[in-house]
Amino acid sequence: MIRGFYNAAAGMIAQQRKQELLSNNIANANTPGFKADAASLRSFPNMLLQQMNSTGFGPSRAGQTVGMLSTGVYLQETIPDFKQGDIKETGVKTDLALLQGNVPVDAATGKPGALFFVVNVNGEERLTRNGHFTVDADGRLTTADGHTVLNTAGSPITVRSQNFTVTREGRVLENGRDAGQIDIAFVDNPNRLVKEGNGLFRSEDAVVTAAGNANISYSLSQGFVERSTVDVEQTMADMMNAYRTFEANQRVLQSYDRSMEKMVNEVGRIG
């Protein structure tokens, strides 16, 4: 019975974490470039039960296999959905949408890699799909959080005003002046990226610059942003299912609690 307490509690914790993940997806449904997370639930290793001895009548049944016992479930990992989001027109010149073309397929996963903008966060490079940029007081092209967008040389892109043009290849032009080439990073297995929040990812592996790479094709659309990959209707349905599953585990836990209370207070009572 004690094992039942643990199994029901593990199910409740897993569904609570899944609910938090889905709630975060809903909260970022309108965040440009946001990649929705999917929950991966796994069961703990099963236990094989065997009868060790027998005190009953008849032949001994010691060593007889009773069967498998489940030990609960847990949320193993969260996996972002790196598919291309829909493109939305904003008309704002600092907004850039990154459209992914043909990219190499990762040999380990059999899935295509992904492309990202490269930004500077406290002196370190980070990756993002959020192309909702702005120009700061120093004329640098930055994210909404103030992180500078980098060129292929690893330096900030500086413009004198918002009256600039970005070519489909990512070249920034202002009144005939070349302000630099926006760096686009290619990651062969995006599932290995570490999600840091605010649309930022950290790569623990070397990334490849896609600009000028004959094996990678992409295009930038100025005045557009990539929408999130959150399916609001499906996410709401998943939240309801997670809530119902949480309630089912809660009722199981309450049933075990009542049975334990009865066993302690009534079983074996001397009349």
Image (tube, rainbow, N blue to C red):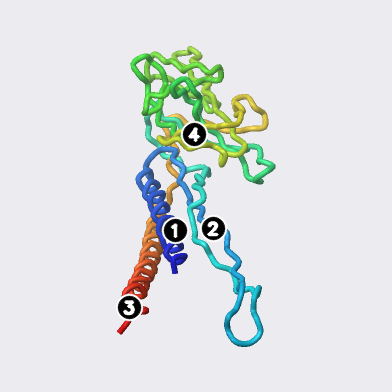
**Percent of width and height locating residue 191:** 56, 42
Residue that carries the numbered disc 4 in the rendered image: 201
Question: Circle 4 sits in a helix, a strand or a loop, which is it?
Answer: strand
Q: Earlier in the sequence, mark 1 or mark 4?
A: 1
Q: Quadrant of the C terminus?
A: bottom left
Mark earlier in primary sequence (1, 2): 1
Local crowd size for mark 1, using a 10 Å CA cut-off: few (<14), some (14–19), many (≥20):
many
Q: Position of residue 149 (x, y in %)?
A: 46, 23
* Quarter of the image where one finds residue 32: top left
Q: Which mark is residue 173?
A: none
Secondary structure at numbered mark 3: loop
Residue in the image at 60% along x and 87% along y: 57
Q: CA distance from mark 1 to mark 3?
A: 28 Å
Q: Are marks 1 and 3 in contact (CB under 8 Å)?
A: no
Q: Earlier in the sequence, mark 1 or mark 3?
A: 1
Tell me the quarter of the picture where residue 63 sits: bottom right
Q: Amino acid at mark 3?
A: Glu
Compared to 234, does 79 lie above or below?
above
- Which of labels 2 and 3 is toward the front? 3
Q: Earlier in the sequence, mark 4 or mark 2?
A: 2
**Residue carrying label 2:** 44
Between residue 38 and residue 55, name the one nearer to us. Answer: 55
Quarter of the picture containing the N terminus is bottom left
The spot of residue 102 in percent (x, y) is 62, 38
Q: CA distance from mark 1 to mark 4?
A: 30 Å
Distance, label 4 to label 2, CA atoms, is 29 Å
* Residue topped by disc 3: 266
Q: Mark 1 vs mark 4: give the one in front.
A: 1
